[in-house]
Image (cartoon, rainbow, N blue to C red):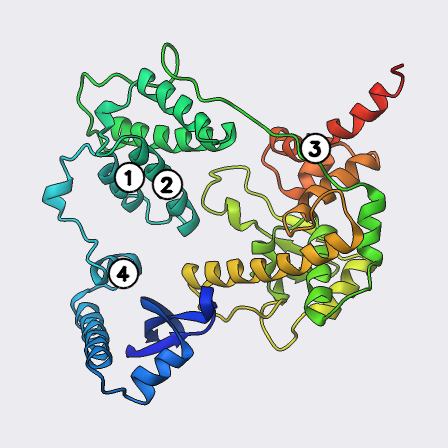
Amino acid sequence: MATFHLELDKRVKLKNDRYNLCVRLGMGNDIMYLKIVAMTKDQYQQVFEKKASDPKSVKFRKECYEFLSRCEELFNDLKPFNKEEYRNMVYGKTVKKEESNCSLLLKDLITQYLDSNPRSKLKTKSMYHTALNSFVEYKEGISVTDITPIFLMDYEKSKREDGYSTATISTYMRHLRSIINHFIYVDKRLPNDYKYPFGKGGYTIKNFRKSKPVMSNDEIQKVVDFNDFQNKEQEYARDIWLLLYRANGMNHADLLRLRWTDIKGQYIVFNRLKTENTRKNNVRDIVVPIYPKLKELIDKIGVKSSPFILGGLQDGYDERTFRNKKDWQQQKINKSLKYISEKLKLSVGLRLKTSRDSYATTLKRSGKSKDEIGEMMGHSNSQVTEYYLASLDMDKTWGINEGLL
């Protein structure tokens, strides 16, 4: 049975000591938070605990309980229950199908495209909406029929002048191309005379890989040896970074959902979250040998009382809970890693994501082949591995130019 009540969500602290006031929907072990407004603990206490009687507080309290009642009614009306659809209904974002089916507005097509892919992750949806906002910002009320090669070239020029990187613009263009392809070949919505804006004779999306500076082996060793912590949080952050680095450059999201049952004897065996719904073939397990240094870290920070090694999740978690937990933990850990970076005066800022770059480049420096490195990191092809190794070219420039007069 579902339960509803108002709650000040203290999981994430906002600016000015505020937290989100939410309706908390409980369905067994599954929890859903529906935001109302941000407020401080004192404000919450005055309005909902002390029942402040001033007109403004009374009105606000009444509106909040009306919102709670609306959440209950919509929950009972929605059969079968779907979280995304329910959230849209609560916030009045549901679009009538008869209004949207014939629409060629880009905002409507993106909504329908994502609805047609129910397995799309929240991060993917967010990326598509960010791309949409960029195009709408450039041309309000943009329709797919407005998108021509000339339009795309002008859009790119404008965004460059606004300071957008080549990589960001190219990402937006790829999302746009996916939308257009879907409504040409799958949900055949576009007019027969619509001229495809990409490819031969049209706009070409640029491939761009930025060379990334990486830490030297000496700097990585300094991180390993560092012990001048101000608090336990900083030590934990360094240990998490080291664990990711020593576990094949594991991504933090994969570590967060890693279970004790993923340890098979002397190995950790897992699949990457990033590729679960994207690869149709070449799906492979990533095998991490648990050598002594890695085992020492797992024993040190592992939570034995939880089914998850880091202990940050509970069975039955949903995607939104996972994302919130991951983002919150990353922010907290990266803040502690920044202190270590500054203390050691590292050439590259220490962040969770640099552990993966450091793993790849350390192996390359030790003479391991690109194919071996790609296999360990779970890459689908050598081009992906090349992205992580591109930074080595920056190191080589010093040796090349040493002979200059």
Q: For the residue marked with disc 3, what is the amino acid?
A: Leu
- Given contact means CB atoms under 8 Å apart, are the residues at marks 1 and 2 in contact? yes
| Whole-percent x, y for residue 371 in the image | 71, 32
Up-down: is 328 above or below 218? Answer: below
**Mark 2 touches mark 3? (CB < 8 Å):** no
Q: Amino acid at mark 1?
A: Ile
Q: Specify the quadrant of the image occupied by residue 148.
A: top left
Observer-nearest of 231 and 71: 231
Q: Position of residue 337 (x, y in %)?
A: 68, 57
Disc number at residue 128?
Answer: 2
Disc 1 target residue: 110
Q: Look at 78% across and 41% down and name the residue there.
A: 362
The Cα–Cα distance between marks 1 and 2, rounded to whole angstroms, is 7 Å
The C terminus, quarter of image:
top right
Q: Amino acid at mark 4?
A: Arg
> What is the distance, in whole Å, between disc 2 and disc 3 at their CAs?
28 Å
Q: Residue at x 81, y 64 (%)?
A: 228
